[in-house]
Amino acid sequence: MRLGCAGKTLGKPGLKSYDARRRDHDPHLSISLAYVRDILCHLDQAGIRFYRLSAKLAPYVHGNDDRDLTAQIDDCRAELAFVGDLARGMNTRLSIHAPLHTVLTCEEEVVANRGARELRTLANILDGMSTGPEAVVVLHVGGVYDDRRAAVGRFQRRFARLPEFVRRRIALENDGRRYSLADVWQLSHTCECPIVFDRLHFLLHNPEGLPLDEALQMALESWPPNTTPIVHFSSPRTDVHFLTRGRGVAAQHSARAPSWSRHSDYVNPFGFIAFVESARGLGEFDVMLEAKAKDLAVIRLREDLKRYAPSLAGRLVNGRSREPASEVDGFGPSS
Protein backbone atom coordinates (compact mmCIF):
# COMPACT_ATOMS: atom_id res chain seq x y z
CA MET A 1 0.00 0.00 0.00
CA ARG A 2 1.32 3.40 -1.00
CA LEU A 3 0.36 6.50 0.98
CA GLY A 4 0.34 9.67 -1.10
CA CYS A 5 0.05 13.43 -0.91
CA ALA A 6 -1.14 16.04 -3.38
CA GLY A 7 0.20 19.27 -4.85
CA LYS A 8 2.36 21.52 -2.70
CA THR A 9 4.56 19.83 -0.10
CA LEU A 10 5.46 21.31 3.28
CA GLY A 11 8.34 19.17 4.52
CA LYS A 12 10.98 21.15 2.61
CA PRO A 13 10.60 24.96 2.47
CA GLY A 14 10.51 26.65 -0.91
CA LEU A 15 9.18 23.82 -3.07
CA LYS A 16 6.51 24.82 -5.58
CA SER A 17 4.09 22.49 -7.31
CA TYR A 18 3.58 24.50 -10.53
CA ASP A 19 4.53 27.74 -12.29
CA ALA A 20 2.06 30.18 -10.71
CA ARG A 21 3.22 33.32 -12.48
CA ARG A 22 0.56 35.44 -14.16
CA ARG A 23 -0.01 35.21 -17.89
CA ASP A 24 1.91 38.42 -18.64
CA HIS A 25 5.05 36.81 -17.15
CA ASP A 26 4.94 33.92 -19.64
CA PRO A 27 4.51 30.95 -17.29
CA HIS A 28 5.60 27.70 -18.89
CA LEU A 29 5.10 23.97 -18.46
CA SER A 30 8.86 23.44 -18.41
CA ILE A 31 9.12 25.45 -15.18
CA SER A 32 6.31 23.41 -13.60
CA LEU A 33 8.08 20.19 -14.54
CA ALA A 34 11.31 21.40 -12.94
CA TYR A 35 9.32 21.98 -9.75
CA VAL A 36 7.87 18.47 -9.99
CA ARG A 37 11.40 17.06 -10.31
CA ASP A 38 12.35 18.76 -7.04
CA ILE A 39 9.21 17.57 -5.28
CA LEU A 40 9.80 13.98 -6.42
CA CYS A 41 13.34 14.12 -5.05
CA HIS A 42 12.02 15.42 -1.72
CA LEU A 43 9.34 12.72 -1.57
CA ASP A 44 11.94 10.09 -2.43
CA GLN A 45 14.02 11.14 0.55
CA ALA A 46 10.89 10.96 2.71
CA GLY A 47 9.97 7.51 1.34
CA ILE A 48 6.62 8.71 -0.09
CA ARG A 49 5.72 6.68 -3.19
CA PHE A 50 2.50 8.28 -4.41
CA TYR A 51 2.10 11.86 -5.61
CA ARG A 52 -0.81 13.74 -7.17
CA LEU A 53 0.43 16.26 -9.70
CA SER A 54 -1.14 19.70 -9.72
CA ALA A 55 -3.79 20.17 -12.41
CA LYS A 56 -2.20 23.59 -12.96
CA LEU A 57 1.06 22.14 -14.30
CA ALA A 58 0.18 23.48 -17.74
CA PRO A 59 -0.33 27.23 -17.27
CA TYR A 60 -3.86 28.50 -17.89
CA VAL A 61 -5.20 25.13 -18.94
CA HIS A 62 -8.70 26.59 -18.43
CA GLY A 63 -8.21 29.21 -21.16
CA ASN A 64 -10.34 29.31 -24.28
CA ASP A 65 -7.42 29.07 -26.70
CA ASP A 66 -5.21 26.02 -26.19
CA ARG A 67 -2.95 26.48 -29.21
CA ASP A 68 -0.10 27.87 -27.12
CA LEU A 69 -0.66 25.17 -24.53
CA THR A 70 -0.41 22.43 -27.15
CA ALA A 71 2.83 23.98 -28.34
CA GLN A 72 4.18 24.00 -24.78
CA ILE A 73 3.46 20.30 -24.37
CA ASP A 74 5.15 19.55 -27.70
CA ASP A 75 8.16 21.66 -26.65
CA CYS A 76 8.41 19.80 -23.33
CA ARG A 77 8.46 16.21 -24.59
CA ALA A 78 11.98 15.68 -23.26
CA GLU A 79 11.14 17.18 -19.86
CA LEU A 80 7.94 15.15 -19.60
CA ALA A 81 9.83 11.96 -20.42
CA PHE A 82 12.48 12.84 -17.83
CA VAL A 83 9.91 13.31 -15.05
CA GLY A 84 8.20 10.06 -16.00
CA ASP A 85 11.51 8.18 -15.91
CA LEU A 86 12.35 9.80 -12.59
CA ALA A 87 9.06 8.72 -11.01
CA ARG A 88 9.45 5.15 -12.29
CA GLY A 89 12.99 4.96 -10.99
CA MET A 90 11.73 6.02 -7.57
CA ASN A 91 8.80 3.57 -7.71
CA THR A 92 6.47 6.56 -7.29
CA ARG A 93 2.91 6.44 -8.58
CA LEU A 94 1.52 9.59 -10.21
CA SER A 95 -2.03 10.84 -10.67
CA ILE A 96 -3.87 14.11 -11.37
CA HIS A 97 -7.20 15.41 -10.09
CA ALA A 98 -9.14 17.42 -12.67
CA PRO A 99 -10.20 20.88 -11.38
CA LEU A 100 -13.68 21.03 -9.86
CA HIS A 101 -14.79 23.39 -12.64
CA THR A 102 -14.10 20.62 -15.18
CA VAL A 103 -17.64 19.34 -15.74
CA LEU A 104 -19.26 17.34 -18.51
CA THR A 105 -22.80 17.54 -17.09
CA CYS A 106 -23.34 21.28 -17.55
CA GLU A 107 -26.03 22.71 -19.79
CA GLU A 108 -23.68 25.20 -21.49
CA GLU A 109 -21.83 23.53 -24.36
CA VAL A 110 -18.97 26.04 -24.21
CA VAL A 111 -18.25 25.10 -20.57
CA ALA A 112 -18.34 21.39 -21.39
CA ASN A 113 -15.98 21.92 -24.34
CA ARG A 114 -13.57 23.77 -22.08
CA GLY A 115 -13.69 20.86 -19.64
CA ALA A 116 -12.98 18.40 -22.45
CA ARG A 117 -9.93 20.46 -23.46
CA GLU A 118 -8.68 20.38 -19.88
CA LEU A 119 -9.03 16.60 -19.75
CA ARG A 120 -7.16 16.24 -23.04
CA THR A 121 -4.32 18.38 -21.69
CA LEU A 122 -4.01 16.40 -18.45
CA ALA A 123 -4.09 13.09 -20.33
CA ASN A 124 -1.45 14.41 -22.74
CA ILE A 125 0.80 15.25 -19.79
CA LEU A 126 0.53 11.73 -18.36
CA ASP A 127 1.06 10.21 -21.80
CA GLY A 128 4.09 12.44 -22.29
CA MET A 129 5.53 10.95 -19.10
CA SER A 130 4.89 7.45 -20.50
CA THR A 131 3.01 6.52 -17.33
CA GLY A 132 1.09 3.26 -17.23
CA PRO A 133 -2.64 2.74 -16.65
CA GLU A 134 -2.14 3.30 -12.91
CA ALA A 135 -1.72 7.05 -13.57
CA VAL A 136 -5.26 8.38 -13.81
CA VAL A 137 -7.05 11.70 -14.11
CA VAL A 138 -9.59 11.73 -11.28
CA LEU A 139 -12.87 13.38 -12.27
CA HIS A 140 -16.09 14.25 -10.46
CA VAL A 141 -19.32 13.75 -12.38
CA GLY A 142 -20.41 17.36 -11.86
CA GLY A 143 -23.69 19.14 -11.20
CA VAL A 144 -27.32 18.07 -11.38
CA TYR A 145 -28.84 21.28 -12.84
CA ASP A 146 -32.37 20.48 -11.61
CA ASP A 147 -32.55 17.34 -13.79
CA ARG A 148 -30.28 14.48 -12.77
CA ARG A 149 -31.28 12.18 -15.63
CA ALA A 150 -30.56 14.85 -18.24
CA ALA A 151 -27.25 15.75 -16.58
CA VAL A 152 -26.13 12.10 -16.54
CA GLY A 153 -27.12 11.77 -20.17
CA ARG A 154 -25.01 14.78 -21.10
CA PHE A 155 -22.07 13.32 -19.21
CA GLN A 156 -22.33 10.00 -21.03
CA ARG A 157 -22.58 11.61 -24.47
CA ARG A 158 -19.68 13.98 -23.89
CA PHE A 159 -17.54 11.29 -22.29
CA ALA A 160 -18.10 9.07 -25.34
CA ARG A 161 -16.90 11.92 -27.59
CA LEU A 162 -13.57 12.24 -25.77
CA PRO A 163 -10.56 10.78 -27.61
CA GLU A 164 -9.69 7.23 -26.58
CA PHE A 165 -6.39 8.27 -25.01
CA VAL A 166 -8.34 10.59 -22.69
CA ARG A 167 -11.09 8.11 -21.79
CA ARG A 168 -8.61 5.43 -20.74
CA ARG A 169 -7.01 7.87 -18.26
CA ILE A 170 -10.20 8.92 -16.43
CA ALA A 171 -11.32 7.54 -13.08
CA LEU A 172 -14.58 8.75 -11.55
CA GLU A 173 -14.85 9.81 -7.91
CA ASN A 174 -17.96 9.88 -5.74
CA ASP A 175 -18.69 13.28 -4.20
CA GLY A 176 -20.18 14.42 -0.94
CA ARG A 177 -23.35 16.10 -2.20
CA ARG A 178 -24.68 15.01 -5.60
CA TYR A 179 -23.34 11.77 -7.02
CA SER A 180 -23.02 8.92 -4.55
CA LEU A 181 -20.89 5.83 -4.88
CA ALA A 182 -23.91 3.98 -6.29
CA ASP A 183 -24.45 6.73 -8.90
CA VAL A 184 -20.80 6.67 -9.93
CA TRP A 185 -20.82 2.86 -10.04
CA GLN A 186 -23.58 2.92 -12.66
CA LEU A 187 -21.69 5.50 -14.73
CA SER A 188 -18.47 3.55 -14.47
CA HIS A 189 -20.12 0.57 -16.16
CA THR A 190 -21.52 2.72 -18.95
CA CYS A 191 -18.27 4.63 -19.50
CA GLU A 192 -15.97 1.68 -18.73
CA CYS A 193 -13.78 3.59 -16.30
CA PRO A 194 -12.69 2.80 -12.74
CA ILE A 195 -13.87 4.41 -9.51
CA VAL A 196 -11.74 6.25 -6.97
CA PHE A 197 -13.50 5.63 -3.67
CA ASP A 198 -13.53 8.70 -1.42
CA ARG A 199 -14.23 7.61 2.13
CA LEU A 200 -15.20 11.03 3.54
CA HIS A 201 -17.51 11.75 0.61
CA PHE A 202 -19.10 8.35 1.14
CA LEU A 203 -19.79 9.18 4.79
CA LEU A 204 -21.30 12.53 3.79
CA HIS A 205 -23.47 11.25 0.93
CA ASN A 206 -24.71 7.67 0.88
CA PRO A 207 -28.47 7.93 0.29
CA GLU A 208 -28.67 4.27 -0.72
CA GLY A 209 -27.40 3.21 2.71
CA LEU A 210 -24.67 0.97 1.33
CA PRO A 211 -22.43 -0.66 3.93
CA LEU A 212 -18.90 0.71 3.79
CA ASP A 213 -17.25 -2.60 2.93
CA GLU A 214 -19.75 -3.29 0.14
CA ALA A 215 -19.31 0.17 -1.38
CA LEU A 216 -15.53 -0.12 -1.21
CA GLN A 217 -15.63 -3.53 -2.87
CA MET A 218 -17.76 -2.11 -5.71
CA ALA A 219 -15.16 0.59 -6.31
CA LEU A 220 -12.12 -1.68 -6.08
CA GLU A 221 -13.61 -4.23 -8.48
CA SER A 222 -14.13 -1.52 -11.11
CA TRP A 223 -10.36 -1.33 -11.73
CA PRO A 224 -8.77 -3.41 -14.48
CA PRO A 225 -6.68 -6.44 -13.54
CA ASN A 226 -3.07 -5.80 -12.51
CA THR A 227 -3.80 -2.12 -11.76
CA THR A 228 -3.84 -1.15 -8.10
CA PRO A 229 -6.95 0.89 -7.23
CA ILE A 230 -6.82 4.32 -5.60
CA VAL A 231 -8.74 5.32 -2.49
CA HIS A 232 -9.02 8.83 -1.06
CA PHE A 233 -8.89 9.14 2.72
CA SER A 234 -9.24 12.20 4.91
CA SER A 235 -10.39 13.08 8.38
CA PRO A 236 -12.99 15.84 8.82
CA ARG A 237 -11.94 19.05 10.53
CA THR A 238 -12.95 19.27 14.17
CA ASP A 239 -11.40 22.60 15.23
CA VAL A 240 -13.54 25.66 15.87
CA HIS A 241 -13.03 28.80 13.78
CA PHE A 242 -12.74 32.02 15.77
CA LEU A 243 -13.93 35.16 14.00
CA THR A 244 -13.31 38.79 14.94
CA ARG A 245 -15.24 41.72 13.54
CA GLY A 246 -14.26 45.28 14.23
CA ARG A 247 -11.30 46.61 16.19
CA GLY A 248 -10.40 47.65 19.68
CA VAL A 249 -13.07 47.78 22.34
CA ALA A 250 -15.77 47.54 19.67
CA ALA A 251 -14.45 44.25 18.38
CA GLN A 252 -16.90 41.36 18.39
CA HIS A 253 -15.70 37.79 18.78
CA SER A 254 -17.58 34.68 17.71
CA ALA A 255 -16.94 31.02 17.12
CA ARG A 256 -17.97 29.00 14.09
CA ALA A 257 -18.50 25.26 14.28
CA PRO A 258 -16.40 23.08 11.95
CA SER A 259 -17.68 21.77 8.64
CA TRP A 260 -17.40 17.98 8.45
CA SER A 261 -16.80 18.17 4.69
CA ARG A 262 -13.51 20.02 5.18
CA HIS A 263 -10.24 18.13 5.40
CA SER A 264 -8.25 18.22 8.62
CA ASP A 265 -4.56 19.07 8.78
CA TYR A 266 -3.57 15.51 9.70
CA VAL A 267 -5.25 12.11 9.52
CA ASN A 268 -6.84 10.46 12.53
CA PRO A 269 -4.87 7.20 12.74
CA PHE A 270 -7.62 5.30 14.52
CA GLY A 271 -10.15 6.13 11.81
CA PHE A 272 -7.62 5.08 9.18
CA ILE A 273 -6.87 1.79 10.94
CA ALA A 274 -10.59 1.00 11.24
CA PHE A 275 -11.11 1.77 7.56
CA VAL A 276 -8.30 -0.50 6.40
CA GLU A 277 -9.54 -3.25 8.72
CA SER A 278 -12.98 -2.96 7.10
CA ALA A 279 -11.29 -3.61 3.75
CA ARG A 280 -9.66 -6.83 4.88
CA GLY A 281 -9.90 -9.45 2.13
CA LEU A 282 -10.80 -6.93 -0.62
CA GLY A 283 -7.30 -6.70 -2.08
CA GLU A 284 -4.60 -4.08 -2.05
CA PHE A 285 -5.08 -0.41 -2.90
CA ASP A 286 -3.11 2.83 -2.70
CA VAL A 287 -4.32 5.70 -0.54
CA MET A 288 -4.17 9.38 -1.38
CA LEU A 289 -4.29 11.27 1.90
CA GLU A 290 -6.25 14.48 1.45
CA ALA A 291 -4.86 16.40 4.40
CA LYS A 292 -3.77 20.02 4.62
CA ALA A 293 -0.40 19.03 6.09
CA LYS A 294 0.39 17.21 2.82
CA ASP A 295 3.63 15.19 3.05
CA LEU A 296 3.87 15.88 6.78
CA ALA A 297 0.52 14.14 7.22
CA VAL A 298 1.84 11.05 5.42
CA ILE A 299 4.95 10.93 7.58
CA ARG A 300 2.94 11.37 10.78
CA LEU A 301 0.45 8.66 9.82
CA ARG A 302 3.29 6.23 9.12
CA GLU A 303 4.70 6.92 12.55
CA ASP A 304 1.28 6.48 14.16
CA LEU A 305 0.76 3.17 12.38
CA LYS A 306 4.09 1.85 13.62
CA ARG A 307 2.88 2.56 17.14
CA TYR A 308 -0.79 1.60 16.96
CA ALA A 309 -0.95 -0.94 14.09
CA PRO A 310 2.50 -2.45 13.41
CA SER A 311 1.14 -5.15 11.09
CA LEU A 312 -0.51 -2.50 8.92
CA ALA A 313 2.64 -0.38 8.94
CA GLY A 314 4.48 -3.36 7.50
CA ARG A 315 2.27 -3.25 4.38
CA LEU A 316 3.33 0.26 3.43
CA VAL A 317 5.57 0.93 0.43
CA ASN A 318 7.94 3.58 1.75
CA GLY A 319 11.52 2.50 1.10
CA ARG A 320 14.19 4.74 -0.41
CA SER A 321 15.05 4.41 -4.08
CA ARG A 322 18.34 2.82 -5.08
CA GLU A 323 19.96 6.11 -6.06
CA PRO A 324 19.92 9.00 -3.57
CA ALA A 325 17.62 11.79 -4.73
CA SER A 326 20.38 14.34 -4.16
CA GLU A 327 22.26 12.84 -7.11
CA VAL A 328 19.41 13.33 -9.59
CA ASP A 329 20.18 15.89 -12.26
CA GLY A 330 17.80 17.21 -14.86
CA PHE A 331 16.65 20.55 -16.19
CA GLY A 332 15.52 23.97 -15.08
CA PRO A 333 16.03 25.77 -11.77
CA SER A 334 16.46 23.61 -8.69
CA SER A 335 14.84 24.79 -5.47
Image (tube, rainbow, N blue to C red):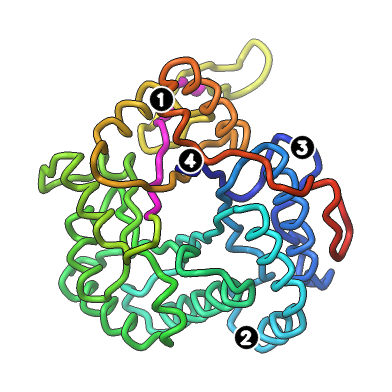
Q: The residue tagged with tag 4: helix, strand or loop? A: strand
Q: Can residue 101 be seen from the camera position used here?
A: no
Q: Where is residue 308? Give x, y as percent.
A: 43, 16
Q: Is residue 118 magenta?
A: no
- Say the numbered circle drawn on residue 311: 1
Q: Quadrant of residue 236?
A: top left
Q: Which residue was labeled with disc 3?
A: 12
Q: Amino acid at mark 1?
A: Ser
Of pointers 2 and 4, the one earlier in the residue sequence = 2
Q: The residue tagged with tag 2: helix, strand or loop? A: loop
- Say the numbered circle drawn on residue 65: 2
Name above or below for residue 194 compared with residue 118: above
Of pointers 1 and 3, the one earlier in the residue sequence = 3
Distance, label 2 to label 4, CA atoms, is: 34 Å
Between tags 1 and 4, which lies in front? 1
Q: Where is residue 111? Give x, y as percent.
A: 44, 78
Question: In this view, which residue lies farthest toward the front?
Answer: 322
Q: Which residue was labeled with disc 4?
A: 289
